[in-house]
Amino acid sequence: MQHRNTDLRIQRTRNAIKTAFQDMICEMEANEITVAELTRRAQIHRKTFYLHYTSIEALFEDMLSELAENYYAMWDQLEPPFSFLEVNRVFFEFCAKNTMYQERLMCDPSYRDFCNKLFTTTLQHNRDHYNPYAHCSERVQRIINKFLTTNSLEFYRDWVAAGKDLPLEELIDITGTLLNDAISSFVEPEYYL
């Protein structure tokens, strides 16, 4: 019984920390978030925070892992070989499910480093599971991957900035066609759909 209560206390404390952190992300620039303000909002002692995380950056890393795991769960449903159109759909459907906190992480310039780290992590996951550009040199692969991630993110950010002025399906179709056509000559013919 004691072990279960301890686990529940730890879980409640971590949930309080994460909830306060998400609220702060929605309200503040990245450089304005402090342990002092976080612990005040989470109603915990500063020492308690440091029992769970070594720093704000460690908390960012934990949140990054959670977001990445949510994305992986969607991406892992694809069965290779698959086209970029399918990957594009997963990306935009994942992004469309974003909460305000996740949207700020992806769109606000002050969180750009966090977002870049998230997409570097997810790209590595994707390529470890399936790489339709494996026949290309490492340098060409990096260029293709940079092109796809940069443009996908910018299309998403523009859509959010414009008040999500297009239906999601239309956004997926337009961006999928643009990006898929742009990379088609680099993909083995059997993977180009």
Image (cartoon, grey):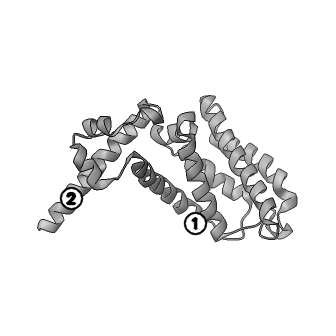
Residue in the foreground of this view, choosing between 119 and 192: 119
Q: Residue at x 83, y 51 (%)?
A: 182
Q: Is residue 99 above or below residue 32?
A: below
Q: Residue at x 57, y 51 (%)?
A: 117
Up-down relation of residue 168 to residue 50 (above or below): above
Residue 154, quarter of the rendered image = top right
User: In the displayed structure, does residue 137 sit left or right of residue 9?
Assistant: right
Please tell me which residue lies in front, 92 or 44: 44
Q: Position of residue 129 (x, y in %)?
A: 63, 70
What amino acid type is highlighted by mark number 1? Asp
| Residue 10 at x, y percent in the picture | 23, 57
Picture residue at 62% right of the left edge, 51% below the top? 91
- The N terminus: image quadrant: bottom left
Answer yes or no: do the residues labelled 1 and 2 have beta carbons within 8 Å?
A: no
Residue found at the far right of this picture: 185
Q: Is residue 124 left or right of residue 44?
A: right
In-image side of 4 versus 122 (left or right):
left
Q: Residues within 10 Å of mark 1 (few under 14, many from 20)?
A: few
Helix, strand, or loop for circle 2? helix
Q: Position of residue 140 (x, y in %)?
A: 81, 60
CA distance for labels 1 and 2: 31 Å
Residue under circle 2? 8
Q: Which residue is mark 1?
A: 76
Q: Which mark is residue 90?
A: none
